[in-house]
Structure formats: C-alpha cells, structure tokens
Image (cartoon, rainbow, N blue to C red):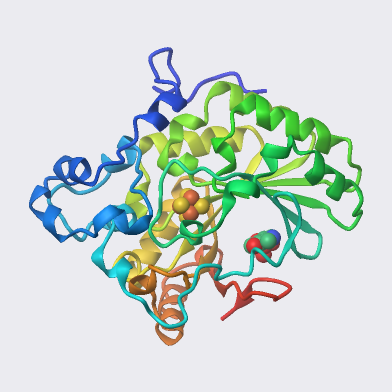
Amino acid sequence: MITASPVGRLSPTTPDWRELWRDAITDVNELLHCVGLGHLADRLPPGDAGFALRVPRGFVARMRPGDPRDPLLLQVLPQLAELDQVPGFVADAVGDLAAREAQGVLHKYHGRALLIASGSCAVNCRYCFRRHFPYGEEIAAAGQWRQALAHLRDDPTISELILSGGDPLALATPKLEELTRGLAALPHVSRLRIHTRLPVVLPERIDPSFLAWLDALPLQKVIVLHANHANEFDEHVDAACATLRQAGATLLNQSVLLRGINDDAGTLAALSERLFSAGVLPYYLHQLDRVQGAAHFEVDDARALALVEAVRGRLPGYLVPRLVREVAGDGSKRPL
Ligand SMILES: *Cc1c(COP(=O)(O)O)cnc(C)c1O
Ligand code: SF4
C-alpha cells in the first residue's frame, strides 16, 4: 500500500489536478508573453492552424525564457509551417479508422487491445495525429465501456489491455475504477498498460486516490510515458514517477523523433539518461506519423538510423530506444 507522500508533494496545499488542467494556457499571446517572446506574435498562423493551443502552466515553467528554439515551446506553439500542404501528409496517417472493432477499441496487434479511453489531453502536441482523428464518437467511456468490455470478453487471445487516447488519465479516478472492475473479471487479461503524457506535463494528476487505485489493481501494470526531451523532467515529474513505481508500475517511455527538438545524438542520449534517473526505461523512438500539418518535424530515415547508432555508441544497450514506424495494416510497429 502507498503510505507516504513523496517529499514536498501532494501536501494539502497541492492544487487539484482538474483545476490545473482547466487553468492551462490556451492563448498564444499569453504563452509568448510568459516566455518573454511577445515580439513573435505576428509570425503565428491564424486560428492556431486549426488545432488549438493548449499547455499546462507547469510545463511552460520548464521552458527557457527568451528562447524561440526552446524544445518544449516548439512542441506546443502553432507555427506557420503547419499550413503547408505536403504530399503524403494526410489526416488518418496510421489507419485507425480501419482497425476499429467496437466503440473505442482498436485491435491491430496480437494479444493486445487498445482502448481509446478519452479524447482529451492536457497538452496539444503539434505533431500529433490527434489533430485530425474524429474522437467524438470513438471514446470508449462514452458507451460506459459496455461495448469495449464485451469485445474483450469475447476474445480470449487478448492478454493485455492498453488504455490510450487522447490521454486516459484525463478520466477521473472513479471512472478508471469502473472500467477496471469489469476488467478484473476477465481471466485472460493479465496486464493493464496505460499510455499517458500526464505524469510529465501535469504530474499533479498522480494524486493519492489515483495511486491507491493503481496499487490495488489485481493486474500487472505498465505505464508508458511520453517525453521527447530531458528538459521535460523536473522534481515534480521525478516525484510522480517514484510514486508510480511504488504502486507497482513498470515505467517505460516513448518519444517521437522531431526535427529541431530532439534530432541530435547528444539530446537523445541526455533524454535516455534523464529518463533512467527518474526510474523510466526508454522504449520506442517513433518516426513521425505523416499527419497533415506536421511535415516540418520530419527527420528522414537515414538520419534517424544514424542518430540511433550514435546513441548506441554512447550508452548501455538498455538506454537505447527502438526506432520504429507505425505502418497501417502491419501486425506490429515496424523497426527501421
Ligand atoms: C502501438 C500499438 C499497440 C502497442 O504496441 P507495442 O509494440 O506492444 O507497444 C497496440 N495496439 C495498437 C492499436 C497500437 O497502435
Ligand atoms: S495524444 Fe499524446 S502526443 Fe497527442 S496531443 Fe495528446 S499528449 Fe500529445
């Protein structure tokens, strides 16, 4: 059981995560002023290029003031380049619509079913396929999980349920409890995996009631975080990771290779080292999904391979992420 709070965190004065979620910055000018870059306001696309800006203030606090190339800022700031129409960059880049088997369930790979547990995220990442996915009708929570659970019950080959989204930790803890009550009754499901960026962008989400739920789950637990740069970590993120591990979760990280943000061997190596110091192992380094509006982030395959080889030359093997691409119709992520 979880007894102690991490040092200096989750005290009675820690604001509720939902309050921090609502208080996120959604106005580009406010963001630029917060980081001392107000003069860039006239170089931005109208209407946030069709995908709203959203970033929690705690994440903004980790940006370097006055630096227009800051790797955290570039992940969230709308850019004029998003308006470029680039051949091959499309709305449904990973074939999600084809893989849908029941409301909110994606079953592409053997033994693993992925549930789109929530369509919301605390942060809007500019490179994300979510900028076009029609989540409105696809969220499993909307159907009170019934359809999704019925699908899992009927397929004994599924041993792992992956909660994804959006961000599944956008759901309130009682909602998660409701889902896992149904899951625990399925004898063939032994693992629960959670794909979430919240412990990184809004670590306050990892609060005592969430930890109590996680700790009590009668399943093996894997949490796959999403961080792209070492600067995304601070002492609050470290504390969130430490308590997740205490609650019995194995922590992995997936990153996206992003031009101008982490496409440098030193930056990737520093990320792996920083992850490990937080108790997290690097898992995947994804080649960008070719979504419309994200072409300016792409790194070509030859450079991507060279970067990972350079990281391999510097770090122990367990700190080298697997470079993969998601290809519609494949039976697994495709290694490069
Ligand atoms: C990425 C993904 C998974 C998980 O794949 P792993 O290689 O096990 O990490 C499962 N289902 C879907 C639909 C996915 O896109
Ligand atoms: S799904 Fe992940 S990458 Fe996409 S916007 Fe949400 S947090 Fe960012």
Q: Residue furthest bottom?
A: 302
Q: Quadrant of the C terminus?
A: bottom right
Residue 217 appears in the picture as rendered: no
Q: Against 229, is 136 above or below?
A: above
Please indicate whether residue 235 sits to the left or right of residue 305 in the image: left
Q: Against 34, is 188 above or below?
A: below
Picture mark count: 0
Question: Measuring 39% from the left and 66% from the top, which residue is drawn there?
Answer: 268
Residue 238 appears in the picture as rendered: yes
**Quadrant position of residue 265:** bottom left
Q: Residue furthest top?
A: 12
Whole-percent x, y for residue 167 in the image: 55, 44
Whole-percent x, y for residue 327 in the image: 62, 76
Q: Quadrant of the N terminus?
A: top right
**Quadrant position of residue 20:** top left
Q: Quadrant of ligand 1?
A: bottom right
Whole-percent x, y for residue 269 in the image: 39, 65
Question: Measuring 31% from the left and 41% from the top, which residue is drawn there?
Answer: 26
Q: Against 155, is 242 above or below?
A: above
**Quadrant position of residue 2:** top right
Q: Residue furthest left?
A: 39
Question: Measuring 55% from the left and 32% from the top, which residue is drawn there?
Answer: 243
Please indicate whether residue 247 sits to the left or right of residue 284 in the image: right
Residue closest to the eye, 120 or 191:
120
Whole-percent x, y for residue 93 in the image: 55, 71
Residue closest to the eye, 254 or 176:
176
Please indicate whether residue 128 sits to the left or right of residue 270 in the image: right
Residue closest to the eye, 90 or 218:
90
